[in-house]
Amino acid sequence: MKRAKSVPAMASPTLKLAAKGLIARLSSINDPKYAFSTASVEIYDTAWVAMVTKRSGEQKRWLFPESFYHLLKSQADDGSWGYHPQTKASGVLGTGAAVLALYKHLKEPLQLHDVSSEEIRKRIILGSESLRTQLQNWDDVLSTNHIGIEIVAPALLDYLKQEDPALDFEFPAQAGLREMNAQKMSRFKPEHLYEAKVSTAAHSLEAFVGKIDFDRVRGHLWRGSMMASPSSTAAYLMYASVWDDEAEGFLQHVLKAGAGHGDGSMPGTFPTSYFEYSWTVVTLLQGGFSITDLGVKELNIIADHLEAGFKEEGGIIGFAPRAPDADDTAKGLLALDLLGRHLSPDRMIKVFEGRNHFTTFGSERDPSLTSNCHILLALLQQPDVAKYYPQIIKTANFVCEYWWSSDRRIRDKWHLSHMYPTMLMAEAFTELLRHFDNGTYPKAADGQLIWRVCICLFQACHRTLLEQGEDGSWEGMPEQTSYAILALAQARKLSLFDGLGKQVQAAIDRGAHYLKTRKVGHHDASWTSKSAYRVAIVAEAYELAALNVQKATRDGAPAVGRSIELPISGPRLDGYVDLVAKTPLFSDVPQWQLRASLVEASLFVPLLRDRRLSVFSRDEFDASEDKYLEMIPFTWVSCSNRGGSFMATSWLYDMMLVSMLSYQADEFIHKSAAPALRGISALSRLIDGVFDELASESKHVNGKSSSSSSSSSSSTTTTTTTTSEVEKKVRAELLRFVGHLLGHPSLARSSHWDLEALRRELRACLQANVAQIEENSRLAKHPSSPVLHTRARRTFFDWVRTTASDRTAIAFPFYFACCHFSSSQTPGEDVFATAAEKYLVDAAIRHLATKGRLMNDFGSTGRDSAEGNVNSVHFPELQRCSAAAASSTPAAKKDVLKRLIEFEEHCCSRALELLSQACLDGHQRRESLHLQKRKVVMATVYRDVSELYGQLYMLKGAAELD
C-alpha cells in the first residue's frame, strides 16, 4: 500500500472474519485470460448460446447441448422463462429467446435424439402463448431501463416471425417500442461496427442479424468475447462465415466458470472483474471495515489489478476490459484512493463529461443517476478538489434535478431497485455537505443548490424510513434492505436528523435483524443488463457493510450539515407539530413522522422566500407578513408523505409556489386592485381583458401557450393613452400573475384540454374575488345585528357552489397540478382522458371547493361578521336551522355547516372512488396501470391538502365557541 486512509475499525470479530474471507476469495478468483464474474445466469443469453452450431467436416452438431437441456428444465408451468417480479422485459426477452431456440432445435435435431419433436412442439406452443400474454401486459416498455431493449426486443420478435408467420404479435406497447427502435436505429450505421474503436453496439450483435456483415466485426473480439456478452458472442459465432476458435473457447470457459457451473446456463455478462473489485472494496471500506480488517496483502492484489486496468485503458476502465464507462471509472478511482493509490480523474472528465451531466458511455438513450453519483463521490475525494468545482456543481445540479423530477420512486438504468440510487445519492450529498461545513464548498455555486441538496438528502432518508416493512426488510429483499440500511447510516451522520435519531437507529436495527434471520438462498436479482441479474460477491459485500454499520456511532465527530440552520426549529416547530396533530387527518400519525415532515417542509421555506416577489410587487401595498410561507410547504409535504404517495419534488415545489401566489393574488385584489380602481366593474373588465389578450397571444403561436411574465410585462406598453396609470399598474400585475401560471415552464408539454381547464378556473377564481367584494359592499349597505345578508341575489346553495367555492382557489390549483402531471408524465395527453373521467374529476373538485368554502366559513364566522365579509351563516336560509326554531344561535348555524361539510365530503369521496374505478378500467387501452394509479394518487393528495387547510380552519372555528 502506497498510502492508506484511516477508516475506524468498528467490525465485530465475526463480521471481520467474513469480510476478510470475502476479500481473500475476490483476490484469488481471477483467471489470467478470461478474468471472472459472479453474475447470476440469465435465460436470454442461455437461449442464444443454445442456438450455436458447429461443423466438423460434413457433420454439423449443436455446440452447447447443455444449454438446450437447461431451457427444457427451466420452463415454467405457464410456458414462460425468465419471469421477474420487478420487470416485464425480463420475461419477454427470456421467453422469446427460448422459443426461438426451440424452433431452431425442432428444425434441426442434429445429434440430440432424446427429446421428441412432439415434446418440443408442445413447449413451443406453451411458450408462444405465454409470450403473447406477456406482450399484451407489457406496460413498462417506455420506462424500462434494460440495456439495448429498444434494439434487442424488436429484433427478437422479427426472428420469431421469420421462424413462424403465426408469431406476428400485436400488443399495446408495440408503437412505443417501434418509436424507440426507430430513434436508436436512425443514429446507427453498420460501418461504425467495422471500425476499431469501441462501440457499445458490440454488446448486442444478436440484434443486427441481416443488418451487418459479421465477418467484419471481429475487431471487437477481446479474449474471445464480444464486449463481455455471451449472447452477442454466440450470435457472432452463428453468423460469421469463418469459425472463431477464440470465441468458442470463451463460451466454453463461461459455461464452466460462470454461475451455472456447467449446468448449461449462462450469465448475461462475463467478465465483470473491475466492477466486482471496485464495488466490493469501496462498499466494505466505507462500511466501516479497515484495511487491516480486510487484509493488506489481498487488497494489494486487487489494487494491482485495478491499476493495471487503468494503465491499459489509458486512464479509464469499464466493468470489464475493453468496455470503458464513466460509472466503473469513477468507482475504480474511489477504490484506489481508499487504498492509498491516487489516480487523476482528468481522463474520465475528458471522455465522459457532457453539457449538463456525465454520460456513462459516449452515447446513450438516457443518462444515469448512479453514474453521476459515483463521479461526484470520486471528485469530492480529490486532494485538489477546488480544481473540479465546475464538474462538482454541474453534477450536483443534475442529481438534484433528476431526484426532483422523479415521481414517487427514483429509477436508474443500471438497477431495478430504487433503493440503490437512493443510497448512492445519500452518500454523495452527505459528502457534499461535509465539504460545505468545512468551507471547501465552491463560493460561486448557486445559493439555492445547497437547499435543494438538503431537500433531496432528507427526502431520500425520510422516505426510506417510511418504506420499511413489518419484518424489518425493504420489500422482502436482502440486497435492497442492505442499500436501505446504508442510506440510513448516512442519515445518522446528519444534523438534519438530530431529532429523529431513535427512529433511524431502530429502523437500522430491524433491518439488520432481518438480514441475520432471513432464509438461506433468498436473493434479489436487480442489476440490469439485457435482462436482470445478481452479482454474488457484490451482494455479499453490501450485506456485510449493512450489518457492520448497525453499531457505528459518530464517535464524537461533528454532525454533517451543522453549518446549515433549519428555517423552522425548536419551540416553533413543536408548536406546529402540536397543532397539526389535532386535525383528524393526522391525529393517528406518529408524532415523529409529523416532525420529520415539518423538518422536510422547512427546507423549502428559503426557496419560497426567494420567490415571494417574483410576480406581485408586494412592497407597494399593505401586504401581510407572509406567515403562510411556513405552513404552505408542510401541507404539501405531509400529505405527500402520508400513505407513501411521494409525489415528485418538482410537483410539490411548484404547487407550493401556486399556493403562495394564490394567497398573494387574493391579497392583491382586495388590498390593492379593488381600492385603486373606481368601480368593481372596471376590475372585472380588466380581468377579462387580461385573459382575452393572453388567449389571443396563445392562438398566434398555433395553440401553444406563449404567456410569460416577460411577454406580459412588455404588453403593458400597448395600452391606450386614456388608460389611467393606476389601471396600468393593476393590469401589469394581473398580466404577470396570469401569464406566469399559464406560461409556466413545467406546463410546456401539457394537453390543450388541461391547460384550458386551468385558464377557465383561474379566470373564475379572480372574478369570484371581484364578486365577493361586490357582495360585501351590498351587505355593508344594510347593516343588521346579527349580520344578515337580506339583499343576496342568489340562494345560499347557488352562491356556495359558484362564487364562494370559486374564490377558495381550490379548483384552479388542481388544474395546474393536472397540467404539471400531463406535461411530465403523459406529454400532450389529457390526464383524465374519457368523458366519465372528466365528469367525475370535475364533480370531485367542485364538491371539494364547496366543502373548502364551508370549512373556511366555519372557522371565520366571527371575523367575517366583524369585518363585513359575506359568510355562509349570513344567508337567510341559515336563520332557521331546525323545524322547531324560527331563528338560530351561532352554535346551531355552525352545526348546520358541519352537516353540510360532511355531505360535500361524502360526495367528493364517492366521486373519487368512481374516478379511480374509471381510470383503472381503461388502463389497457392507454398508458400503464402505474400511471393510471398515480393520476388518482395525485388527485387524492390534492384532496388531502385541501382537507388539511379546512380542518385547520375548523379548529380555529371550534375555538371561537369555547
Image (cartoon, rainbow, N blue to C red):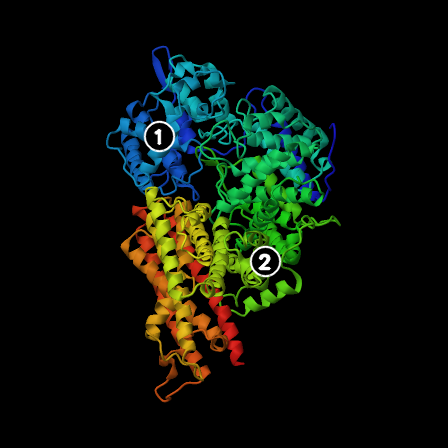
Q: What's the amino acid at mark 2? A: Ala
Above or below, 399 against 876 in this view is above
* Residue type at the position of mark 1: Ala
Q: Can I make out residue 521 in this image?
A: no
> Residue 796 falls in which quadrant of the image?
bottom left
Label 1 – label 2 distance at C-alpha: 46 Å
Q: What element does badge 2 sit on?
A: helix
Other-residue count near label 2 (Cα within 10 Å), few / some / many at <14 / 14–19 / ≥20 = many
Left/right placement of residue 954 relative to residue 118 reads right
In depth, the one of 785 and 720 nearer the eye is 720
Measuring from the top left, give residue 919's x and y in whole percent. 33, 54
Q: Position of residue 791 (x, y in %)?
A: 35, 78
Q: Which mark is residue 182?
A: 1
The answer to whether residue 8 is left or right of residue 432 is right
- Give the quadrant of residue 232: top left
- Name the residue furthest top: 57
Sequence order check, earlier mark of 1 and 2 = 1
Q: For mark 1, give the secondary structure.
A: helix
The label number, if any, that marks residue 297 in the structure image = none
Vertical side of 630 occupied by 230: above or below: above
Query: Which residue lies at the image location 59% right of the left edge and 65% below the top edge?
Result: 576
Q: Nearer the viewer, residue 472 or 563?
A: 563
Residue 15 position within the rendered picture, expressed as x and y whole percent measured from the top left: 67, 43
Residue at x 56% of width, y 36% of height? 372
Q: Is residue 623 visible?
A: yes
Give the position of the N terminus as an image quadrant.
top right
Q: Which residue is mark 2?
A: 596
Residue 243, image x, y percentages: 41, 13
Is the residue 252 above or below the residue 667 in the image? above
Q: How many marks?
A: 2
- Of the 4 image quadrants, the one containing the C terminus is bottom right
Q: Nearer the viewer, residue 617 or 850?
A: 617
